[in-house]
Each structure stands twice: as structure tokens, then as C-alpha cells.
Image (spheres, rainbow, N blue to C red):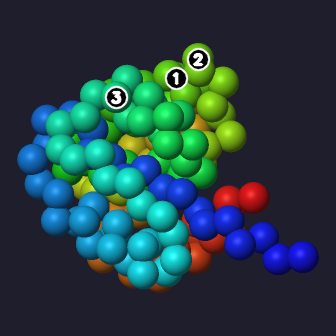
């Protein structure tokens, strides 16, 4: 029997970053690949993101940060997901994340970081391969 359940993705822009073109491109690509995408909009707090992820029963949280605040925001989302027993949600990040910050992001629990120039198909493939 084939599982026809669509992968549900929460696309989020944490922090004060006001640039959302990238997350909108990713959201459309994921939707076009057959996923259900919920975009939370700009300037979301980690708490708002986690609450929305749980309420929407998503499989994936995809966050984008261009402001440099990823070192605080991404780990805070992971901490709140753990507090809410929602560690089964795959969390990926993107935006302007310096290479030297990627190990700390992964240590915090971010499954993958996708930087500028990443092909949308690579993100789609990663999600499809890692959502059980």
C-alpha cells in the first residue's frame, strides 16, 4: 500500500529579517513538488514558529535567516521543540549562514543548512529522503 500523505512543511522567517524572496521561492518549489507548505510570514519569534509547527502537525520546519541572528534563533527553535516533545520534526535552515557556523547549527539539531545558490531540487530531495 502506498502512503499518499503529503509532506507538510512550515516555512518560517524568524527574527527581524525583512527579506522573504528566498523562502517564497523555496515554498513554491516544495509546493510544486507535491508538499503542503504553510508560510508563517516575516518576523516570527521562535515560540511562534514552534507553536505553528505543532498546531499544523508539520513534518518539516524550514527556516531562513539573512540577518545573522541564526546563532540564536535556530538553536532556540530546537530548544522549544524539545520542550514541547516535538523533536520528530525535521528542521532545516537556510539563508546567509557562514560555513564556520554550520557545525554549531548541526550540533543544535538543525538537520541541514542550505545556502545561497542551492538548487531547489536538492532541498526537495533532502526533505523527501529524510521525512519518514
Q: Residues within 10 Å of mark 2 (few under 14, many from 20)?
A: few
Q: Do we see residue 97 in this rendering?
A: no
Which circle marks residue 101 in the picture? none
Query: For residue 25, what is the image quadrant?
Result: bottom left
Q: Do we see residue 42 in this rendering?
A: yes
Cα distance between the residues tagged 3 and 2: 14 Å
Q: Nearer the viewer, mark 3 or mark 2?
A: 3
Q: How far across and how far down the image is residue 110, in percent? A: 53, 44
Q: Looking at this view, is 11 or 70 the one in front?
A: 11
Please indicate whether residue 128 sits to the left or right of residue 120 in the image.
right
Which residue lies most toward the right here? Answer: 1
Q: Nearer the viewer, mark 3 or mark 1?
A: 3
Cα distance between the residues tagged 3 and 1: 13 Å
Above or below, comparing residue 21 to residue 91 in the picture: below
Instruction: Give me the residue at 27% from left, 61% from top.
Output: 23
SS for dot 1: helix
Please indicate whether residue 22 sits to the left or right of residue 119 in the image.
left
SS for dot 2: helix
Q: Quadrant of the N terminus?
A: bottom right
Q: Give whichever of discs 3 and 2 has the lower sequence position.
A: 3
Q: Residues within 10 Å of mark 1 (few under 14, many from 20)?
A: some
Q: Residues within 10 Å of mark 3 (few under 14, many from 20)?
A: some
User: Which residue bears the numbered disc 2?
Assistant: 83
Instruction: Give me the residue at 22% from left, 47% from top.
Output: 41
| Disc 2 + disc 1, Cβ < 8 Å | yes
Please indicate whether residue 66 sits to the left or right of residue 88 in the image.
left
| Disc 3 + disc 2, Cβ < 8 Å | no
Which circle marks residue 79 in the picture? 1
Instruction: Give me the residue at 82% from left, 77% from top.
Output: 2
User: Which residue bears the numbered disc 3?
Assistant: 48
Cα distance between the residues tagged 2 and 1: 6 Å
Q: Give whichever of discs 3 and 1 has the lower sequence position.
A: 3
Amino acid at each position: 500500500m502506498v502512503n499518499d500523505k503529503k509532506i507538510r512543511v512550515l516555512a518560517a522567517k524568524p527574527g527581524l529579517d525583512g527579506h522573504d524572496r528566498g523562502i517564497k521561492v523555496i515554498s513554491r518549489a516544495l509546493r510544486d513538488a507535491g508538499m503542503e507548505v504553510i508560510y508563517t510570514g516575516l518576523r516570527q519569534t521562535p515560540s511562534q514558529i514552534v507553536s505553528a509547527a505543532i498546531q499544523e502537525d508539520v513534518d518539516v520546519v524550514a527556516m531562513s535567516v539573512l540577518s545573522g541572528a541564526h546563532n540564536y534563533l535556530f538553536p532556540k527553535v530546537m530548544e522549544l521543540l524539545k520542550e514541547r516533545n516535538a523533536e520528530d520534526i525535521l528542521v532545516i535552515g537556510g539563508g546567509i549562514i557562514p560555513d564556520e557556523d554550520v557545525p554549531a547549527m548541526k550540533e543544535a539539531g538543525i538537520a541541514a543548512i542550505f545556502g545561497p545558490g542551492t538548487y531547489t531540487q536538492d532541498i526537495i530531495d533532502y526533505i523527501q529522503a529524510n521525512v519518514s
